[in-house]
Image (cartoon, helix red, strand yellow):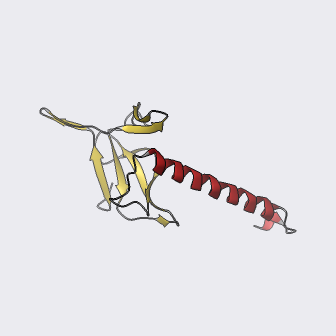
Amino acid sequence: VTETWEVILQETIGSWQRRIVKSEWGSTGWTTVSPVFSDPNAVGVAWETRWFGEGTERLAKECREVGPDGQTFVGPPMVLKASITVNNSVDVDSKEFHKRFCKSQGKAQSFASKFNEAILKLPFNRSTL
């Protein structure tokens, strides 16, 4: 972890607790799931302060789980994504938001698959790519 990373640790100070939770959207709405971390030694998360990627709908940062010393990365690198279109007036917990988001992602995947199929049909030597 360097100065370009923000770190949040799950911790207890006296009677105060900072908990990190993992949530999933299901048929009944948001539910908390366990385990929170993918690595059994993780006690927090860290993310790069700079965005490394920008798409039409989302921004992306590198995200990592952090070990007990609060400075060492554990587990694989992950991606933290944020919607470009979300602002304070959008209810990101609403079922409608997620329906629209999933529908647009499904459509994008369909277009990408069709594109990839078309590319594979082109007459060129693939071994030189």
Q: Is residue 70 visible?
A: no
Residue 126, image quadrant: bottom right
Percent from the top left, x then y, of residue 54?
Answer: 49, 66
Q: Residue at x 44, y 59 (%)?
A: 83
How many marks can you see? 0
Where is the C terminus found, in terms of image quarters?
bottom right
Percent from the top left, x then y, of residue 17?
Answer: 20, 36
Where is the N terminus found, in terms of image quarters?
bottom left
In this rendering, the answer to whether 94 lies above or below 34 is: below
Residue 48, image quadrant: bottom left
Left or right of residue 15: residue 32:
right
Out of 125 and 31, give the one closest to the viewer: 31
Percent from the top left, x then y, of residue 65?
Answer: 39, 44
Left or right of residue 74: residue 116:
right
Out of 91 and 67, give the one closest to the viewer: 91
Q: Residue lying farthest left?
A: 14
Q: Residue at x 32, y 58 (%)?
A: 5
Percent from the top left, x then y, of residue 107?
Answer: 64, 56
In this rendering, the answer to whether 129 lies above or below 21 is: below
Left or right of residue 84: residue 116:
right
Q: Is residue 28 visible?
A: yes
Q: Which residue is drawn at 34% across and 51% down?
A: 46
Q: Residue lying farthest right?
A: 123
Out of 24 and 102, give the one closest to the viewer: 102
